[in-house]
Image (tube, rainbow, N blue to C red):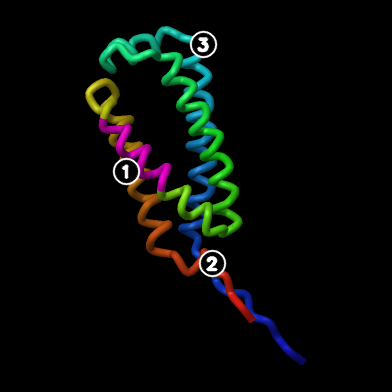
C-alpha cells in the first residue's frame, strides 16, 4: 500500500493570507469613505499637503481589490500571490510613513503588520514552491 505525504504548510503563511484579506477589506472600505468625502477623510486630506482625497480614495479602493485577490493567491500558495503580497506590504509600509504624524498609533500598527507580512512571505518560501513528484 502506497502512502502519499502532504507537505507541511506554514501557519504563518495562512495567517498572512487571512491578514491580507482583512487589510484588503479595510482598504476597500477606506477607499469608499474617501470617495464619499466624509469628515474624517477631509481632515486627513488637509494634513497630507492638500492632495485630492477622492483620487486617494480610488487609489486605496483599487489597491484593496488587488489585495483581496492577493489574499486568495497567498492562501492558495500561489507564487504570484507571494510576489504581490510582498509588493503591497512594501507599498503599505512605505505609505504608512506619510500618515505617521496624523495617526501615529495606527501608522505604527500598519507598519508593524506589513513588516510581519514581509517576514512571513520571505521566511516560508517553501510553501510557494511547486512539488514535482
Secondary structure under the numbered disc 3 in the rendered image: helix
Where in the figure is residue 108, as x and y percent of width and height?
Answer: 28, 36
Residue visible at 42% across and 42% down?
88
Where in the figure is residue 7, as x and y percent of width and height?
Answer: 57, 74
Is 80 on the left or on the right of 96, as rendered? right
Where in the figure is residue 100, as x and y percent of width and height?
Answer: 25, 28
Q: Which residue is mark 3?
A: 36
Residue visible at 51% across and 40% down?
67
Q: Which residue is mark 2?
A: 9
Q: Quadrant of the C terminus?
A: bottom right
Q: Which mark is residue 12?
A: none
All told, the count of numbered labels is: 3
Which stretch is magenta? Answer: 87-97
Where in the figure is residue 114, as x and y percent of width and height?
Answer: 36, 44
In magenta segment, residue 81: no
Up-down: is 52 above or below 15?
above
Residue visible at 32% across and 43% down?
112
Indicate the quadrant where residue 93 lies: top left
Task: Give the CA separation, mark 2 to mark 1.
Answer: 23 Å
Magenta span main SS: helix
Secondary structure under the numbered disc 2 in the rendered image: loop
Residue located farthest toward the right when viewing the structure as drawn: 1
**Marks 1 and 3, the one that precedes in the sequence:** 3
Is 16 on the left or on the right of 51, as rendered? right
Label 3 Cα crowd, 10 Å radius (few <14 / some 14-19 / many 20+): some
Which of 57/100 is in front?
A: 57
Amino acid at each position: 500500500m502506497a502512502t502519499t505525504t502532504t507537505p507541511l504548510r506554514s501557519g504563518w503563511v495562512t495567517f498572512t493570507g487571512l491578514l491580507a484579506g482583512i487589510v484588503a477589506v479595510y482598504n476597500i472600505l477606506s477607499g469608499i469613505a474617501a470617495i464619499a468625502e466624509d469628515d474624517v477623510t477631509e481632515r486627513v486630506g488637509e494634513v497630507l499637503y492638500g492632495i485630492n482625497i477622492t483620487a486617494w480614495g480610488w487609489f486605496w479602493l483599487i489597491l484593496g481589490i488587488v489585495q483581496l485577490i492577493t489574499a486568495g493567491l497567498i492562501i492558495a500558495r500561489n507564487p504570484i500571490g507571494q510576489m504581490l503580497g510582498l509588493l503591497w506590504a512594501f507599498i503599505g509600509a512605505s505609505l504608512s510613513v506619510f500618515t505617521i504624524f496624523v495617526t501615529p498609533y495606527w501608522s505604527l500598527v500598519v507598519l508593524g503588520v506589513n513588516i510581519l507580512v514581509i517576514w512571513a512571505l520571505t521566511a516560508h518560501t517553501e510553501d510557494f514552491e511547486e512539488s514535482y513528484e
